[in-house]
Image (cartoon, rainbow, N blue to C red):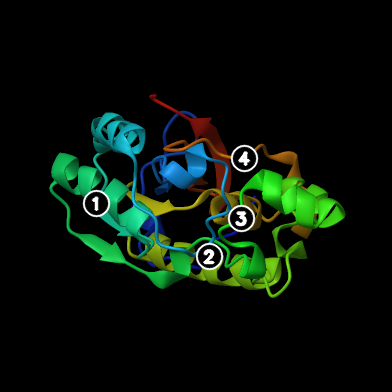
Amino acid sequence: MARLPDDPAAGRRHRSSEGLSGRKLVLLRHGRTAWNHARRVQGQIDVSLDDEGRAQAAAVAPVLAALSPTKLWSSDLLRARETTAALVAATGLSATYDARLREFHLGEREGLTHDAYAAVAPDEFALFRRGHYDSAPSAEQTSDVRTRMTAVLHDLLAALAPGEAGIAVSHGAAVRVATGAMLGWPDDQFHTLRGLDNCGWVLLQEQTETRTLHLGAYNCRVL
């Protein structure tokens, strides 16, 4: 759990029977790409959704639209923007694109298949598969990803009125790190979370009295 910044509108909130009637934040991973399917390291290389990814985005959009979100923010990478396009159509919202929601930059290993990565640097690849994403040479540090992701997600939360929901479309490794950080977990506890599936999402819910975030759901999927 993590305490959120002070909100002058907090006194106008209405408490539900479970006390979780505050703001909601959905962190959605983008749909599948051909690189995902081929088990190729993407990082910040721009790759389009494949047919399966477009179907995933089309399926998840009306489900998340049913939450009546009022804000829709997205990574500016192509696979996230294409996923967001389905949400724009389903919600009628305009999207805000923010580079802070990007995936880890994975340095020299971007573009390698997992098999090739394992052949080139087996020990390093084993660390990578366990969620030590910054083990790759010249990769973005986990602490830097945590800092930028929590900053943008707190900005999104601050843009929500009491009881409103916002959606952030991002990437698997970045969301995994951000989930633990937003809940106030110790730095490495995010390793206890499994990786998100394509178009899997996380729901963070605000407890109105304590102004803390709680994990409402993890890796929810439609397809």
- The residue drawn where x is 30% and y is 47% is 83
How far apart are the alpha carbons under marks 4 and 3? 19 Å
Q: Nearer the viewer, residue 139 or 219?
A: 139
Residue beneath the point at 46% across and 36% down: 200
Mark 2 Cα-neighbour bin, 10 Å: few <14, some 14–19, many ≥20 = many
Residue 70 is marked as 1
Q: Which residue is mark 4?
A: 195
In the image, what residue type sits under mark 3? Leu
Residue at the outermost right position:
123
Q: Position of residue 78 (x, y in %)?
A: 33, 58
The answer to whether any part of residue 80 appears in the image is yes
Along the viewing direction, whichever of 127 and 168 lies nearer the viewer: 127
Would residue 96 be found to the left or right of residue 169 on screen? left
Of helix, strand and loop, which one carries label 2?
Answer: helix
- Residue 87, given in percent of the width and then of the height, sits at 24, 44
Left/right placement of residue 12 relative to residue 4 reads left
Q: Which mark is residue 149?
A: 2
Q: Nearer the viewer, mark 4 or mark 2?
A: 4
Camera-side mark, 3 or 2 = 3
According to the image, label 3 marks what residue? Answer: 112
Q: Nearer the viewer, residue 211 or 121?
A: 121
**Quadrant of the frame with the C terminus:** top left
- Amino acid type at circle 4 is Gly
Q: Alpha-carbon distance for marks 4 and 2?
A: 17 Å
Q: Earlier in the sequence, mark 4 or mark 3?
A: 3
Earlier sequence position, callout 1 versus callout 2: 1
Mark 4 or mark 3, whichever is nearer to me: 3
The secondary structure type at the circle numbered 4 is loop
Mark 1 or 4, nearer chain start:
1
